[in-house]
Image (spheres, helix red, strand yellow):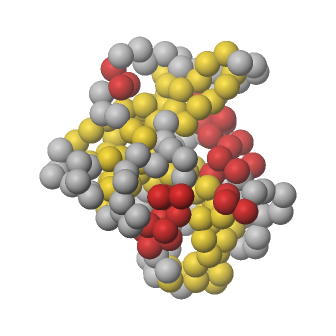
Amino acid sequence: MAAIHRTTMTPAKLELLTGWLPKQSWYAGDAQTPELVRAGGFRLDDPEGAVGIEFMIVVDTVREPVAYLVPMGYRGAALEGVPEEALIGTSEHGVLGARWIYDGVHDPVVTAQLRALLRGEAVAQHQSESDTPDPTVTVYGTGPDDGLDVRLNRVLRSGEATRSPSGRLVAGWTWPDGTAARGALATVAPR
């Protein structure tokens, strides 16, 4: 199980995401500089213990709040063979040293562990507590992923999970006003 270190990262994750998020094609805001707050998420363990895996939910509070899902892979060295835009940024971790932070859809360890979660072979972990499963993360109606396409919902909508929960990864987040929300983070469908 991955250990959560109580330390600093410079620059911090939200600082890196503030510059990276507006450059993404799925960014729904019109601000050049979003105002991001952490709203939820969970972690997955890398069986090899080399890559930190986090599925972070952030909310842009400029105008009407918008929730985004950003899966991230934290590595001790650059990841070869991925597009340049896959790199969210680099940061100095107070315990582990330099970290290369990648958009998880481009990180093979992150995508493999997401598929393991959807197959029931991995357990979602609490975002900020070591060795603590997160029972609020729910997988509905998946299983073996042969021939299945996993699609992440980058812009999250509250309540989407209740409309047809089959083939979905569902989790919650908190809006800036304190209201709890729950929705589909990913859907699974035949290719």
The number of numbered badges drawn on the structure is 0
Residue 43 falls left or right of residue 177: right
Quarter of the image where one finds residue 137: top left
Q: Nearer the viewer, residue 81 or 53?
A: 81
Residue 125 falls left or right of residue 107: left
Against 111, is 144 above or below?
Answer: above
Against 105, is 144 above or below?
Answer: above
Residue 157 falls left or right of residue 113: left
| Residue 52, horizontal then vertical, whole percent | 62, 61
Q: Residue at x 44, y 73 (%)?
A: 15
Residue 189 visible somewhere in the drawing:
yes
Against 89, is 118 above or below?
Answer: above
Quarter of the image where one finds residue 98: bottom right
Q: Nearer the viewer, residue 8 or 89?
A: 89
Q: Quadrant of the N terminus?
A: bottom right
Q: Quadrant of the C terminus?
A: top right
Against 95, is 179 above or below?
Answer: above
Q: Residue at x 62, y 40 (%)?
A: 114
Q: Residue at x 66, y 35 (%)?
A: 115
Q: Residue at x 53, y 63 (%)?
A: 20
| Residue 180, horizontal then vertical, whole percent | 22, 42
| Residue 48, horizontal then vertical, whole percent | 75, 57
Residue 42 visible somewhere in the drawing:
no
